[in-house]
Amino acid sequence: MLQTIEWKNSTLWLLDQTLLPNRIEFIECHSFQRVAQAIKRLEVRGAPAIGAAAAFGLVLGAKELCNDSDFGTNIERVAEELRQTRPTAVNLFWAIERMMSIIHKANCDKDIIDLVKDLEKEAISIASEDCAINHKISQYGAQLFNEPVSVLTHCNAGALATAGFGTALGVIRQAFSEGKITRVFADETRPLLQGARLTAWELMQENIPVTLITDNMAGWVMKKNMVQAVIVGADRITLNGDVANKIGTYSVAVLAKEHKIPFYVAAPVSTFDFTMESGLNIPIEERHADEVAQFAGVLTAPKGVEVFNPAFDVTPNSLISAIITEYGVLEQPYHEAIIALQQKKIKGVL
Amino acid sequence: MLQTIEWKNSTLWLLDQTLLPNRIEFIECHSFQRVAQAIKRLEVRGAPAIGAAAAFGLVLGAKELCNDSDFGTNIERVAEELRQTRPTAVNLFWAIERMMSIIHKANCDKDIIDLVKDLEKEAISIASEDCAINHKISQYGAQLFNEPVSVLTHCNAGALATAGFGTALGVIRQAFSEGKITRVFADETRPLLQGARLTAWELMQENIPVTLITDNMAGWVMKKNMVQAVIVGADRITLNGDVANKIGTYSVAVLAKEHKIPFYVAAPVSTFDFTMESGLNIPIEERHADEVAQFAGVLTAPKGVEVFNPAFDVTPNSLISAIITEYGVLEQPYHEAIIALQQKKIKGVL
């Protein structure tokens, strides 16, 4: 499994996901600005991976400010620049918050060089914890499957979207290894084809049988009983269990309901937004028209066509059969289950 | 409006739809083989357009056989080759049948040159009738709309898919001219992007406001109440009202049901298969994996990925609010309404 995110000799190495599967290249980030750019350009993407990358971005920003007399103000500026990269995935804000709390908790007279070391340790923890969390999610998730089934997934919630192993694809990997999942149907996930370019690639690397389909085939595949469950990742989960995820997830959830197929979401606790009651308030990123109207520099639509290009949608909790976290599987009513999760978090049980 | 199909000086000119919107080029067909190839390659596509093209293909085939001592056997071979081009759209078989009946009805001693003239007349009638039929469909369809709404369409059922004006896009054109439709959301329609390349192009040519979306955005657009109706064309409609149409239509119909949005189908009577009870029996064409895994010669997925690429799906009658024909609007129960249509056809009322 290729490493999506690696911290080596005070440099962040990011696997450039915009070039997959045709080229495997790494981006060498020496500055927080380069990390911010990589997040904006989707060179690194996937909620947990964005969180980890931003944490390392903050380390790079802090290093630059080692001799800055106004470290406090300027590190806040770095944090803000990282926060501004993408609006929807909450892991980004969560990771930056966790990093900033190291700074806020530090004694005023603490040496900045020591503080930077603490920040580096914390970012490394965020990444390594994410990997461990994914394995836990995967084990809980695999328990939802009994007899061998085919599943459908949308976008990429794999090793590439995390610091390793993956959430939805982690569950698929684990259940495949236990003989409970035999084939994966991967929606190609327009406009940026994360399903075709990343999910199919990850699964083929490990010889997990995968069939690529266009997004508009998902309903027909269900109708023909070619899949028996759906599993996806998440970018933000609100207190009531509404889930923001890659555009198209909502349609797949409606189709799953119509076909009485379970629709599972796999995500770490860092994807939960405990400050937000429902998905109605989640800010949805809209991206450039060219993502829809061009491919590989070739126009796919008339020049100047008007485009609507939301990067995410929100699936209401009523369409979700279960949410798989590193602390177990949440079921309806989600509000209670998520409040209980929040309480555990406050008490430090997590 | 560009002419999709034109018969000039014993030559069939087809607008090459695979090159749109980037290039406008016409294919000059001097042989039935070239027509068959154009249908297979989707250089001409859309159920009514395929029917008209095949009719002219048969004329070209008959011309070649003018001095053939075994005209009867060999024209049947031509018809069969044209029938073998694509399996799903019934207009293809309907048009060939109509052309062949001219031959079957002819006296044995009829001069073949005269017979070819009759065939040419019949093919010209098929094309010109199609144009008139589209206008009737459009007028009936526009009556379904009252206050100004935005509609969603999938694939291309426009002038490009017919001998002129269009079925679903014909209704949209008419209702737009009456102020009842104000904007069209066009699904791009993967894998071959007929929505992006053809529908958006047709509408922009006439200054009808169009917003291009990827197929997986349709559900979210409905959820956000950005569209109030769906209208699509059809490739085959069975006696019970089941509708085969471009892959993804079924998903859109399920999404429309979930959002309580009417889902309309517009098609001429030549799209009805009066010999088939239900959509379960409609043969669904599967096309090459490269259509999904490549774009403009660039791989969009890992080399060798397994692909499922059905070109059509079947929407059950229960999801269809109305079927708009040149004889009026059919509503549930469709079986009765379609049998009545068949009776009219037998009696020659049509």
Image (tube, coloured by chain):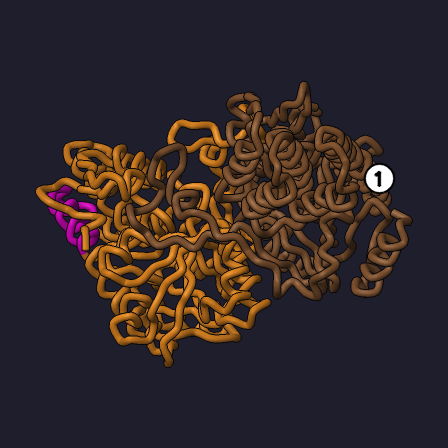
Chain colours: A orange, B brown
Q: Is residue B73 left or right of residue B130?
A: left
Tell me the amino acid under the disc marked 1.
Lys
Front residue of B15 and A193: B15
Name the spot of residue B302 as percent of width and height, x first: 30, 47
Q: Main secondary structure of the magenta part?
A: helix
Residue most toward the top? B9
Is B332 placed above or below B75 here? below
Magenta segment: A108-124
Is residue B254 a member of the stretch shown in magenta?
A: no
The image shows residue B296 at horizontal and vertical percentages of 40, 32
Element class at badge 1: helix
Is residue B185 visible to the viewer in this orientation of the structure?
no
Judged left or right of residue A12, residue A89 is: right
Q: Which of the pair A159/B153 is nearer the observer?
A: B153
Q: Quadrant of residue A167?
A: bottom left
Q: Is residue A114 magenta?
A: yes
**Location of residue A133 by image quarter:** bottom left
| Residue plotted at (37% across, 80% down) | A147
Q: Nearer the viewer, residue A19 or B7?
A: B7
Q: Chain of mark 1?
A: B
Q: Which residue is mark 1?
A: B136
Residue ID at (61%, 64%): B281
